[in-house]
Image: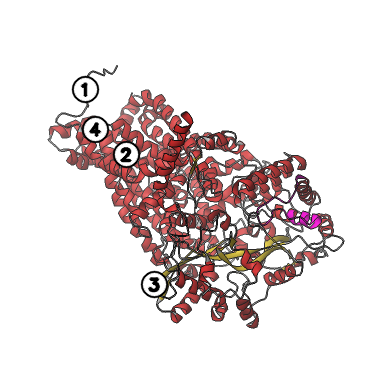
């Protein structure tokens, strides 16, 4: 498709130079070269070294990476992180989309409800929330009491790997605010006329959802998918504070491992290598999502 | 040759790395500022972590200092425990550490491998009076031949029991390991547990098992120099001992404990608050938070358990907190003088009280004793410990990576994933390898 | 009729949902009046008695300053940050979304790459940069990056929203002879106002909750923001602490966040065309 002999053409509106865009993104370019590229490169270089905190980095080639790939904790942490992403992201997006649809209806008092529904996200990883959430799932906690009352047998949430993971997933789903806000803003952008004309054509709610709402929200869904995936892959706070990575490292994420290696075990070289592996994995997945959705998005 | 090319590349890389971390390189004695023999006008930064009483007391002590030495201003940098290691580590590797800092015992291993990570306090003997310490206590702050840190207080882990629950079910506070096992079955009748051990950041489950084996064998699990003193069989004995505690209902299994308490500490557990769990293994300096949550009952310091023939050795003691001076300090004389004030000054000792544990310094200790400030179960426990002739806990023992290995082994044994034999082999290998790497 | 039934149904669902969302806040407020043993042993949110001393003690703090001082510090970080973020992110996103220029793809992938990199290992080198600039223990490391569009997430988000703006609007403005920046301010920004408001809210809330960055860069107690001050007396390694004081101050800390959101939320739903097409 591309012809190398030809000078690259920049598709800009008439009268705009190819440098206009470059000028506009200047803040980013300056910041990138001033503040971001250095830590980025340093972490890359360090991943080939043995470096604990108060000494000189020592070059050791690919040893860190070799050690990583033979480290069973590393594989487990990746497995756990993937499991977490798969359990969390679709659920969170579905819940926030449905809530956003509900909260975008124009009825009295909606502003109040919108604020209420956002409150859990304001709380974030607040210390008090950590205590409360932890206690919800203990063997005699509120969740088990409710389960018991409706006749479902109690669950030993913290005792097994998958239930323990749900504790964290539920917390993050419950804090769906930021995802929901993005949906709200996007729903707001859907021209009302589309719905009006659909109504006159006699389309029902379900039909309008699938033929108007969903297609109009594809960019927002894509955006949330990417953002949620990135945050989920780097999840640290919730398992760190609530399950401590237990039981049997069943909630021990890669980000927790990076943290432990760099701040607790003083293996900064190893932590850097681990970060780069995670970086490559996320990049590849993001690239895949970008490629796969390209056609749908540009329709 | 290919090899030499590779060498060239690596040396080039090392040079560029040193540029990246200019500051972290070349930690030699030459670029340290030597004492100049006079106290000049300056501002010193002093950092510590702690809770309200420590902050209050220390700020008051600083006020007192400022009255005595108005020329040497102390800037206090303090905060909670969360994140403090991250903060201090970053400061230390960025050469921006405070002049005087409160540190933990095991940090010396990683932060000052060769004794060059902190200021050598031997150079400051003109200012710091060390006569309040015996040589053994001083040796805990030595790295190579350099005095890197000074012990503030010593602390040992002891057992503390909920005496009201014990008397309620007519149980005796245990004196020997046998008593403890017996108690398990007794408590079982009442659906309670006499003790709790954890695999959290404290790794108390492994700690007690080690004490047991140290007492039986007379060996030290990890020596002061960082050698592994246990054999694989010793480790197996320790794990078997742990398992027997679970099997005999002395403690909850790891799984039950997790289900009931989540990842919370024992003093945040409803089971402890309501008395279902009636005992804890804790550092004497940290037991206050357990006392605090018990409203209708109270804790009592337990005995240091002994074998049936009366042997009570094997229990351990360690410096719970230390002070160090930054190797980048510009004012070593002044920092030394301030450190001496913190450690030796009687008036200061009175103000600080036991906010950093029971002082190891004799001058400070005497000052507190004469004013009757030494009392409570934490003091009782440390008195009992003194009578058992405790061994000093190796600074290597509590390295985070090792604690992680201990906890993994205990957890796998408890969940039945590994037999004690398999787990002991794994643990032995892990610990041995790690110690070799870090030493 | 059916429309009314629908409305009632919606309200019922909304109210049920609110209970679910509100419970923690009730618990939080309740817990601020409880003692430690009560917090950890009862699941019910109502305290046994109401005593406002945690609020008073928490506000006074054990340090040299009261909580109000730390609140103000937090706002000293938040205000510049929000301004910087909005300006730099909208310029950058506008450039990426609407223009074609040399190295565009490369630069955009750099932007995304920064999002994929775990931050933990970047702390130390970043710290070195700020140290060499001599601005440690100031708010500059916490605020200045926002001036350089450091939040890739926001730019990515704005790019998506800008792409959604109907082309016709752009074309219409060109005919009117609007310049580059004029178009951004008068055509695009009104169109993506909900997204910009979200960015402000996110920046506000994240800064309110941010812990690690200020922890590392700020060492003088005088300059601590609220998050550091809140944890100032939390020492789990020794004698423990009273949770109610900390929870009480968290409740106080929630007030600005909740009010900011309550004020801003109405901008999410409005007639988009109001600002642009007329």
Q: CA distance from mark 4 to mark 3?
A: 56 Å
Residue C44, how many percent across, how many down? 60, 57
**Tag 4, which secondary structure?**
loop
Q: Nearer the viewer, mark 2 or mark 4?
A: 4
Q: Chain of mark 4?
A: C
Q: CA distance from mark 2 to mark 4?
A: 14 Å
Label 2 sits on residue: C158
**Would residue A8 be visible to someone looking at this image?**
yes
Camera-side residue: B225 or A191?
B225
Label 1 sits on residue: A7
Q: Quadrant of the C terminus of chain A?
A: top left
- Main SS category, magenta section: loop
Seen in the picture, residue B323 relative to A193 is either above or below; the reply is below
Residue at the location (47% across, 75% down)? B62
Q: Which segment did they paint magenta?
A: B210-232
Q: Nearer the viewer, mark 1 or mark 2?
A: 1
Q: Are discs 3 and 2 both within one chain?
A: no
Label 3 sits on residue: B42
Query: Which label was assigned to residue C99?
Result: 4
Q: CA distance from mark 1 to mark 2?
A: 30 Å
Camera-side residue: A41 or B212?
A41
Q: Nearer the viewer, mark 3 or mark 1?
A: 3
| Lateral position of residue B211 relative to residue C64, left or right | right
Q: Are discs 4 and 1 both within one chain?
A: no
Residue A78, how many percent across, how many down? 55, 36
**Tag 1, which secondary structure?**
loop
Q: CA distance from mark 3 to mark 1?
A: 65 Å
Q: CA distance from mark 4 to mark 1?
A: 18 Å
Camera-side residue: C277 or B182?
B182
């Amino acid at each position: 498709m591309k012809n190398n002999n030809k000078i690259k053409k920049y598709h800009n509106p008439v009268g705009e130079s190819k440098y206009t865009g470059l000028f506009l993104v200047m803040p980013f370019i300056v910041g990138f070269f001033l503040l971001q590229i250095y830590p980025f490169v340093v972490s890359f270089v360090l991943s080939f070294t043995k470096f604990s905190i108060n000494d000189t980095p020592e070059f050791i080639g690919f040893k860190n990476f070799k050690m990583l790939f033979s480290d069973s904790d590393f594989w487990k942490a990746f497995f756990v992180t993937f499991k977490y992403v798969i359990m969390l992201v679709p659920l969170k997006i579905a819940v926030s989309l449905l809530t956003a649809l509900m909260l975008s209806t124009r009825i009295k008092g909606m502003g109040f409800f919108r604020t209420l529904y956002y409150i859990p996200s304001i709380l974030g990883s607040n210390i008090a929330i950590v205590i409360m959430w932890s206690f919800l799932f203990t063997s005699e906690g509120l969740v088990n009491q409710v389960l018991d009352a409706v006749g479902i047998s109690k669950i030993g949430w913290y005792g097994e790997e998958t239930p323990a993971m749900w504790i964290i997933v539920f917390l993050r789903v419950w804090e769906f605010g930021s995802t929901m806000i993005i949906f709200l803003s996007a729903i707001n952008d859907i021209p009302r006329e589309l719905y009006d004309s659909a109504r006159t054509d006699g389309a029902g709610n379900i039909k309008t959802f699938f033929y108007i709402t969903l297609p109009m929200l594809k960019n927002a869904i894509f955006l949330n998918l990417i953002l949620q995936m990135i945050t989920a892959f780097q999840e640290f706070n919730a398992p760190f504070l609530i399950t401590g990575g237990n039981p049997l490292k069943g909630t021990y994420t890669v980000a927790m491992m990076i943290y432990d290696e760099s701040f607790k075990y003083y293996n900064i070289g190893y932590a850097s290598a681990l970060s780069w592996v995670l970086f490559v994995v996320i990049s590849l997945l993001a690239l895949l999502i970008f490629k796969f959705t390209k056609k749908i998005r540009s329709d | 040759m290919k090899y030499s090319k590779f060498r060239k590349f690596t040396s080039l890389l090392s040079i560029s790395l040193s540029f990246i971390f200019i500051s972290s390189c070349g930690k030699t004695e030459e670029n340290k500022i030597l004492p100049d023999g006079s106290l000049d006008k300056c501002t010193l930064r002093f950092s510590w972590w702690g809770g309200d009483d420590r902050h209050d007391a220390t700020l008051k002590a600083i006020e007192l200092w400022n009255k005595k030495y108005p020329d040497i201003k102390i800037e206090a940098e303090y905060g909670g425990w969360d994140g403090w290691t991250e903060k201090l580590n970053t400061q230390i590797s960025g050469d921006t550490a405070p002049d005087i800092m409160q540190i933990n015992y095991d940090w010396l291993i990683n932060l000052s491998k060769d004794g060059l990570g902190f200021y050598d306090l031997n150079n400051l003997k003109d200012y710091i009076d060390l006569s309040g310490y015996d040589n053994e206590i001083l040796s805990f702050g030595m790295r190579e031949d350099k005095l890197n840190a000074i012990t503030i207080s010593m602390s040992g882990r002891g057992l503390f029991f909920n005496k009201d629950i014990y008397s309620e079910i007519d149980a005796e506070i245990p004196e020997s390991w046998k008593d403890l096992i017996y108690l398990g079955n007794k408590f079982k009748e009442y659906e309670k547990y006499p003790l709790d051990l954890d695999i959290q950041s404290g790794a108390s489950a492994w700690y007690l098992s080690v004490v047991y084996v140290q007492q039986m064998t007379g060996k030290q699990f990890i020596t002061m120099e960082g050698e592994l003193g246990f054999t694989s069989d010793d480790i197996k004995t320790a794990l078997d001992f742990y398992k027997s505690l679970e099997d005999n209902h002395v403690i909850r299994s790891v799984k039950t404990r997790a289900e009931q308490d989540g990842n919370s500490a024992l003093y945040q557990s409803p089971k402890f608050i309501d008395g279902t769990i009636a005992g804890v293994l804790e550092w004497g300096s940290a037991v206050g938070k357990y006392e605090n949550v018990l409203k209708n009952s109270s804790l009592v310091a337990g005995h240091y358990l002994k074998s049936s023939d009366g042997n009570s050795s094997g229990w351990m003691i360690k410096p719970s907190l230390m002070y160090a001076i930054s190797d980048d300090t510009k004012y070593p004389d002044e920092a030394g003088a301030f450190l001496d004030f913190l450690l030796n000054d009687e008036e200061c000792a009175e103000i600080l009280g036991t906010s950093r544990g029971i002082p190891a310094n004799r001058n400070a200790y005497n000052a507190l004793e004469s004013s009757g400030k030494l009392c409570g179960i934490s003091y009782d426990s440390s008195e009992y410990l003194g009578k058992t002739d405790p061994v000093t806990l190796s600074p290597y023992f509590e390295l985070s990576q090792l604690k992680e290995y201990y906890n993994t082994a205990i957890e796998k044994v408890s969940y039945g994933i590994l037999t004690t034999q398999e787990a002991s082999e794994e643990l032995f290998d892990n610990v041995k390898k790690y110690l070799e790497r870090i030493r | 009729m059916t429309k009314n039934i629908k409305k009632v149904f919606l309200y019922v669902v909304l109210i049920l949902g609110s209970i679910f969302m509100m419970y923690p806040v009730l618990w939080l407020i309740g817990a601020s009046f409880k003692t430690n043993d009560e917090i950890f042993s009862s699941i019910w949110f109502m305290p046994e008695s109401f005593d406002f001393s945690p609020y008073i003690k928490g506000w006074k703090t054990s340090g040299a300053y009261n909580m109000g001082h730390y609140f103000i510090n937090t706002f000293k970080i938040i205000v510049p940050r929000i301004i910087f973020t909005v300006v730099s992110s909208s310029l950058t996103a506008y450039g990426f979304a609407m223009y074609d220029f040399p190295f565009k793809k490369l630069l955009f992938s750099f932007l995304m790459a920064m999002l994929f990199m775990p931050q933990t290992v970047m702390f130390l080198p970043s710290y070195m940069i700020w140290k060499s600039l001599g601005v440690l223990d100031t708010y500059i490391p916490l605020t200045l990056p926002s001036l350089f569009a450091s939040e890739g997430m926001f730019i990515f988000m704005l790019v998506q929203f800008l792409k959604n703006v109907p082309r016709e609007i752009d074309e219409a403005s060109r005919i009117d002879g609007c310049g580059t920046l004029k178009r951004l301010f008068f055509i695009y920004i009104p169109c993506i106002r909900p997204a910009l408001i979200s960015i402000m809210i996110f920046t506000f809330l994240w800064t309110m909750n941010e812990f690690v960055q200020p922890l590392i860069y700020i060492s003088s107690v005088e300059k601590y923001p609220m998050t550091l001050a809140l944890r100032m007396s939390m020492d789990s390694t020794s004698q423990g602490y009273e949770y109610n004081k900390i929870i009480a101050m968290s409740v106080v800390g929630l007030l600005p966040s909740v009010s900011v959101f309550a004020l801003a939320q109405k901008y999410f739903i409005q007639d988009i065309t109001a600002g642009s097409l007329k």
